[in-house]
Image (cartoon, grey):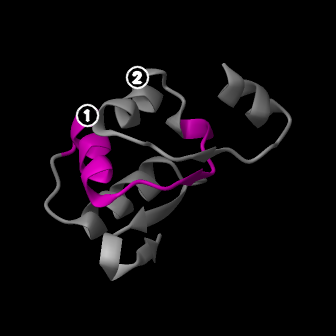
């Protein structure tokens, strides 16, 4: 996949899910481990964690889980009028 190629050449990968459906695709493809930056909204973040099998209650818990599972991942969580959270 393109993610594997980018990883091989040590190029950062930025993934911005654009829907609840599309945010699961990177997990299905087992490519989230190659992603350097992900920019989901709160709902997409929840869908990703739920899809992995982690039903967590808060955005903070979800970010923490993903960072522990994927140590190279930086999360830019968009929160509409409330701004963003960098994790």
Residue 2 sits in which quadrant? top right
Residue sitting at 25 percent across and 52 percent down?
43
Q: Which residue lies furthest to the bottom in this view?
A: 82
Distance between the alpha carbons at the discs numbered 2 and 1: 9 Å
Residue sitting at 28 percent across and 45 percent down?
49
Q: Is mark 2 on a helix, strand or loop?
A: helix
Asked if the stretch drawn in magenta spans residue 51, the answer is yes
Q: Which residue is under mark 2? A: 28
Asked if the stretch drawn in magenta spans residue 19, the answer is no
| Side of 14 where 22 appears, left or right | left
Mark 2: few/some/many CA within 10 Å (<14, 14-19, 20+): few
Along the line of sight, the residue nearer the viewer: 39 or 63:
39
Along the line of sight, the residue nearer the viewer: 72 or 79:
79
Residue sitting at 86 percent across and 35 percent down?
9
Q: What stretch is highlighted in magenta?
A: 33-54
Percent of width and height locating residue 60: 29, 69
Percent of width and height locating residue 65: 34, 55
- Looking at the image, do the residues carrying marks 2 and 1 touch, with CB atoms under 8 Å apart? yes
Residue sitting at 28 percent across and 59 percent down?
42
């Amino acid at each position: 996949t393109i993610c594997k190629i980018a990883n091989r050449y040590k190029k950062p990968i930025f993934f911005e899910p654009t829907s609840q459906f599309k945010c699961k695709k990177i997990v299905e493809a087992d490519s989230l481990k190659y992603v350097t930056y992900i920019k989901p909204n709160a709902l997409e973040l929840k869908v990703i964690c739920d899809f992995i099998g982690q039903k967590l209650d808060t955005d903070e818990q979800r970010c923490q889980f993903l960072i522990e599972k994927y140590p190279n991942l930086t999360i830019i969580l968009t929160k509409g009028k409330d701004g963003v959270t960098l994790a």
